[in-house]
Amino acid sequence: MKARTPAGDIADLMTMNLGPSHPATHGTLRIFTALDGERIVATACEMGYLHRGFEKMIEQGTYQQVLPYTDRLNYCSAMMNNIAFCKAAEGMFGVELPERCITVRIILTELSRIIDHLVCICTNLVDIGALTNFWYFFNRREDVYKIWEKLCGARLTNTVTRIGGMYRDVYPDFASDVRAVLPGIEEAVREVRGLIEHNKIFVDRTKDICIVTAEDAISWGWTGPCLRASGVDRDLRKDDPYYGYETYKFDTVIGTTGDTFDRIMTRIYEIGESVGIVHQALDRLKPGPINSTDARLMMPSRQQVYHDMEALINNFKLIYEGVRPPAGEYYDAFEAANGELGFWIVSDGGTNPYRIKVRPPCLTQYAAFGAMVEDELVADAAASLGSINIIAGELDR
Amino acid sequence: MSGAHHGDHSHGHAAPARPAIQPGLSKERLREILESRLAAKTDSRDLRGTTVIVARERLRDAVLLLRDESDLRFDQLLDISGVDYLAFPGHRGPRFAAVYLFKSTVFTHRITLKVEVDEDDASVPSIHDLFLFANWAERETWDQYGIVFVGHPNLKRLLNHHEFIGHPLRKDYPCQKRQKLSVNDPMIDQLEARLKQRGYTVLEHGVFEPGTPMTYHDKAGAAR
């Protein structure tokens, strides 16, 4: 199309659709652009290609049945979503979890954060053409997936927690398996840093590209590593700690300019911090009960069911009806790999959720993407899209 | 809190360190401020006690107050949600509510604003100009609940297809209902509006063929 530019010249603009948009892929996005040469001058972004009606579906089942759906939000770190939802629901009940459950959840959360960052960074680097890093990171991710398999039988969609505890206790060698994968992860991070950090091609492609200032990042509602990359030192694990995160020693990683380089590097350095947290949590992992004994949430033992009338009734009620949080509304937030994952839950006191709104961290990032890539080159838009880690499962719900 | 800067590899102009996050005001104090200055009332449904209901005429004033007052500084709009109380046991009052979740990067306090609207006049003023994220958040709430955000520059559906009819999260929308949606959204209008916003004058419109409906064939080969 012909257009007069702000400088008064006549430009012949080309319109082009960007974005992963093969009908057979998941994670389809559409970024409709107007190009002046190779420069993007205007964008219009579309989403919703993976919209399944998550929030409508979960109103049809019970609270425990929400969990398999949460796996399919950010499917690169499914366990984190399970834990975040359970934490929100447990908050409504006001239930205290046993120490062992919390420690196991922290280990699973931080390992999930690590593999989420690994996927984000290495696919981002593939988009720039740095393929080698992909193998370094995906091999280490595979190590963690082997632990997931041993833990619950599933790799991608784990459904490993329950409201009130875990699906079951971890297997006997869990701690030693986790300890065994951590050095490999640290080694992979060292290798990838060695490949990219002072690599002229990588640095030229990412430094001062698609800058988001701290002020804009805040107004866009950004949270998590993308916000920190813009220099805003905010992390729920520090600012509003839960699960005793205040007792763990770790640093928040922050960037300086909020460019693509900072967003990638923030995640790379966060992997190291998470490895540190996992080590500390493993040291604290002591034998003990894994589940709460709250009768509103957890099934009584078989022994009790066969010998105690109340326990038998409790068993039936939990099977036929499910758990019943008190009537009311409740918002709870969790520092997920991508930022603040929140659940706003409306309960009418019944067994089905009346309304659950998911606050997906990557929606705010994608909302900003159009403005972020304007005045940048097409190739830089591709490099930058990876750095904000859009996961269509949670974006489109 | 110690920030592990990776700035040593970086550009030389390090951003000034932000002060550590402060506790902020108690929820009682927050409610008191909103009640006295904006005639808001505390929502007894919220189990945490951080939700206040404001009249829609006061919504923009409330958002500005929350954002700009030096001891409030709610500088992040986290999300906008809708809720339909049609099937809520014992509910009296307006059918819908728009729910605004705020947090701050300066203080740890949080607040939720709720605006109740009736079915026959389901509209609230838009705050797209106050928070960058509000534009999309309002589009999603319109899409899912049919609440109109008055003054929004581009109130299109966000999650659903543009041909979709109805608002799926309303309690009277059947969850098994299916709709056939086939024509792509050309989006050229949105792109041209954005060009205009950025100072371009479109002299010759883009040539595009609006999508034609696809033809589907059943097993016997007949088109339907």
Image (cartoon, helix red, strand yellow):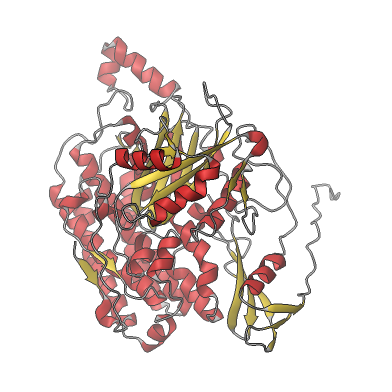
The image position of residue A132, as x and y in percent, is 39, 77
Above or below for A72 versus B96: below
Above or below for A174 versus A12: above
The residue nearer to you, when weighing A215 against B2, is A215
Residue ranking furthest to the front: B37
The residue nearer to you, when weighing A253 against B192, is B192
Residue in view at x 47 percent, y 32 percent: A353
The image position of residue B181, as x and y in percent, is 73, 51
Left or right placement of residue A240 versus residue B52 in this view: left
The image position of residue A190, as x and y in percent, is 26, 75
Where on the picture, by quarter, is residue A361? bottom left
Residue in view at x 51 percent, y 67 percent: A369
Residue ranking furthest to the top: A309
The image position of residue A171, as x and y in percent, is 24, 43
Above or below for B73 versus A318: below
| Number of numbered callouts drawn | 0
Residue in view at x 53 percent, y 49 percent: A397
The residue nearer to you, when weighing A321 against A252, is A252
Left or right placement of residue A363 versus residue B34 in this view: right
In this orientation, does residue A77 appear? Answer: no
The residue nearer to you, when weighing A39 against A131, is A39
Where on the picture, by quarter, is residue A266? bottom left
